[in-house]
Amino acid sequence: MSLVPAVSSTAERPTPVFSLLNERHVNMMSFSQCIGIGLFLQNGRTIFLAGPGLATLAYFLAGTVMWSSAACLGEMTALFPVKGPIFELPRRFLDESFGYAAGWITWFSWIVLIAAELVAITHIFQFKYPPEQLLADGYPEATLEWMPRISSTVIVMIFLVVLLLVNLLPVRHFGQMEYFFGVIKLCFIITMIILNTILHSWDRAKRGHFWTYNAPYSFGSQNLTLTNGHVIEGATGKLGGMWEAMLTCLFGMIGFETVAITAAENRDLRTEETVKLATRKISLRIIMLYCLATFTVSLNVPYTHPLIQDHAVISLGHGQNSAFVISTVLNHLHVWPYFINCFIIFSASTAGANGIYNASRTLHALASVQDAWPQWGFIQAVRTRLERTYYGVPLGSVVFSWLFGLLGFLGSDPTSARILGRMVRCVVISMLIVYAIIGLSFLEFYQTLKVAASGENETIDDEDEATTRQRYDRNCPQYPYRSHGQWLRALYAFVACSLFILFNGWRTFVSPMHTADFVACYIPILLFSVICMAYQIKLNGWNPLNWRRRASRELQNPPPQFATSSPRRGHIAFKDPENLFTGANLGALVRWIWVWMK
């Protein structure tokens, strides 16, 4: 397809956001966003679908897909720290319609996620462990419940107000709060890992040690039960359960892209390896902690436990369905079930606050590009207001995105568990579409860099050709962010995300067909397609024969200087390589450990 040069309409804004976030803020904002309700409420469902061992493997495999896509976005953002990289980079290197559609569907995902977190909070407030199950689990108390006499509507309203107030803070204060929240979440997950390891060693439930891996603590589940009651046995059942488990895992990992979304407000972006280190840190932390948490809790909770059994295509349970709560009940611990349930509320609310941040910054970046909007007068007037910032905070975008949190009042519906599950699936598939687009964009980005580094790019006018080549040479030691085999990882991310998108709702086709679940599984594809076609009509007219790919492939706005930290902070650099056991080398090792730990 021919390339028609597209002119960027991004102009200099008189009211930009402020670059006040430093590396530690970016690290923990990304981590805090990922740690919401996904791990705590769906961990048990994953264990049920795949079995203890395969559930751990499911989190690892899903994590590699997310890591591959995040690395693609991270490398492109490190070299081109543009505003709204999640849509600007696909617009530049892939196609203008794809880029803008990716931006809108990202914003759609975050506003739905905000509502989903609020609905989940109403669920967690309805904490009631079934008395008959308490008796079966041998719990010493007859009741275990915490259900405040307060309406779900009031709960949603209270949390909506709190989330709005937090997001109206200057970004520096917001980053400080998110850093504090992220540290608390990190400590809690580590505590859960240690606690479940101790409980398994304690073995009060007399389940036997994990190396036996006997049923119902087997490595993998034995079958998969469909919604119509049909049971799939053998390898096919295990494969189906593993596939569903990975789809469940993906929701708990959405948020890796927060590193790139913060680029416009990142103070150290051009002088430190912020994007590189933050992307790798969030990937390593999430994959490692999720796998360890799943493995340790599955040692104490059988995958056949009634409270984690869920045959529905799409659903999301309450606090009593959390594997972490069930683990403490099976081991007859007091107070801990309430503590874990309350922490899930805290985790969901902070993830919701971060979701508003991501939604508002994505919308603000879109508002800064006139071509991303219809050329109608009243729409452009709205766009202008959404573009404005006050003290560096895009208040219009914050409030407008926050308003969609009113969908959280769906939590008062008796079928809210199913509604919440469908909202979650919409978010997952929408973001998978974006991740696939990012992977495909990187493949084009990679080829464009190769041409630029070889000096064959005629669109670059630079008096110092050697400097230009070095700037875009991925083998240059000072290239901001490069991962080994990244081209192959981009292809892996694109193929894996595409497969997840296409086959995410295969169980909805089982007779009798679940129409509502089918719509939830595949409506993001329709939404993305409609937006892309709308842009093609806007740019090239109504005749599909005239539709053309529009990608500028502009290698503009590169960083004026590469990351200046010397030696590179991500690499360990001994002062005396020939004599390792020296005080200077020990100091270098400690500094390197601190860089990756903080």
Image: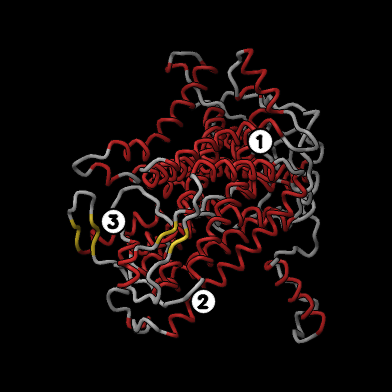
Give the number of the mark in front: 2 or 3.
Answer: 2
Q: Amino acid at mark 1?
A: Val
Taking depth in this image into account, of 190 and 433 the one nearest to the observer is 190
Graded by Cα atoms within 10 Å as few (under 14), some (14 to 19) or many (20 or more), the crowding at tag 1 reads many
242 vs 98: above or below: below
Q: If you read the primary sequence from the N terminus, does the residue marked by circle 1 or circle 2 appear first?
A: 2
Residue 505 x %, y %: 32, 44
Q: Amino acid at mark 2?
A: Leu
Residue 195 x %, y %: 51, 76
Q: Which residue is mark 3?
A: 240
372 vs 274: above or below: above
Local secondary structure at mark 3: helix
Q: Which residue is mark 1?
A: 398
Label 3 with label 1: CB-CB less than 8 Å: no
Residue 494 x %, y %: 46, 46
Residue 486 x %, y %: 55, 54
Q: If you read the primary sequence from the N terminus, does the residue marked by circle 2 or circle 3 appear first?
A: 2
Label 1 with label 2: CB-CB less than 8 Å: no
Can you see residue 492? no
Please tell me the numbered disc located at residue 186: none
101 vs 449: above or below: above
Taking depth in this image into account, of 117 and 214 the one nearest to the observer is 117
Mark 2–mark 3 Cα distance, whole angstroms, equals 31 Å
Mark 3–mark 1 Cα distance, whole angstroms, equals 40 Å
Graded by Cα atoms within 10 Å as few (under 14), some (14 to 19) or many (20 or more), the crowding at tag 3 reads many
Quadrant of residue 555 in the image? top right
Quick one: which residue is furthest to the front in this view?
149
Please tell me the numbered disc located at residue 195: 2
Can you see residue 123? yes
